[in-house]
Image: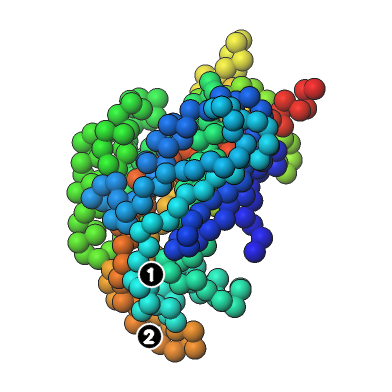
Amino acid sequence: MAGNSFGKLFKLTTYGESHGKSIGGIIDGCPANLELDIDKIQLDLDRRKPGQSAIVTQRKESDVVEFYSGIFEGKTTGTPIGFQIPNADQKSKDYDHIKDKFRPSHADFTYTKKYGNRDYRGGGRSSARETACRVVAGGIAKQLLQPMQITAFTSAVGSLKLSKNYQDLDFNSIENNPVRCPDENLAKDMVKYIKSVRKQGDTIGGVVTCVIQNVPVGLGEPVFDKLHAELGKAMLSINAVKGFEYGSGFAGTAMPGSKHNDEISTDGTTKTNHSGGVQGGISNGMDIYFNVAFKPVATLIKDQDSIDKNHQKVTVQGKGRHDPCVVPRAIPIVEAMAALVMADYYLLDKISKV
């Protein structure tokens, strides 16, 4: 199976399935002598792990990362960093009823048709459990990138949306509620809505907004390796993501150029930032900001019409433990993928200036 690695210089390769013995990976290309705070990496894993609140899947996983190589006396050695996260709370029998059936809008059907086999236990390799490996690598990349700061938060759940610009939000309040929205009142409404959706046996999608601050000028490569293009690829590689927009995004299409252009001040900053911190595929020193759209989870706790492996009509009956909304747990995943992209371009930029 191809497609298990991400990055050019700072490269992550992951392994494992949802109900296998473990998941894990190898991070190659991390510079030597980077002093790591393992607790910060674990904190990001704790933000992603299941069972952390009443509005997420109740699968119980400690998600404690174990490092096996590439780190000595708290510092990176410059060699590949190997790590593992054990799987503990598998209930594979919850999936016996769908081993020959395909869940609508799930990867069940496409994986089976592509590979001729399928690990139906929790979705196997297509499960979002794999994203824990990305969070580990992203946690290391974040520490490499300091003083760059990467912050993601929930900006929409269903039709409930933040009305404030990110500059007017208190990022310190993001972790004060289970939905990770930096607006206390809206967060309460989002939590209430997600709980009501779950009671109906249904799911709902939403939007994660990410902001990258203290970005130096010059990160990104021209033509095919533009910075925003790689960020888009990174976000669209996350399970359940259906859309990516940066800067003014689709709203910018309704603006005349005279309003949309970011006028440059004498200090090199721009008076506005409709460009989203990227021009010509290269960072301009302003904040990079983008939105990531997540669809409703495909597995519902209600009956749906589908087909089986013989293409006969069947009813798929929902069982098991699933998120009614993936957005709250996706926050550290979005940050991690952004960090992997920025780390790659940070290292590429250093090489180009040697």
Figure colour scheme:
rainbow
Residue drawn at (58%, 38%) of the image: 340
Q: Which residue is mark 1?
A: 92
Q: Left of 254 or right of it: where is 176?
A: left
Helix, strand or loop under label 2 = strand
Q: Is residue 300 above or below residue 344?
A: below
- Name, please, the residue furthest toward the right: 354
Q: Residue at x 40, y 87 (%)?
A: 313
Towards the viewer: 276 or 310 = 310
Furthest toward the top, the residue is: 266
Please name the amino acid that badge 1 sits on. Answer: Ser
Tag 1, which secondary structure? helix
On screen, 15 above or below 286? below
First in sequence: mark 2 or mark 1? Answer: 1
Can you identify the residue that label 2 sits on? 314
Work out how far the residue at label 2 is from the one at label 1, CA to CA, in angstroms.
21 Å
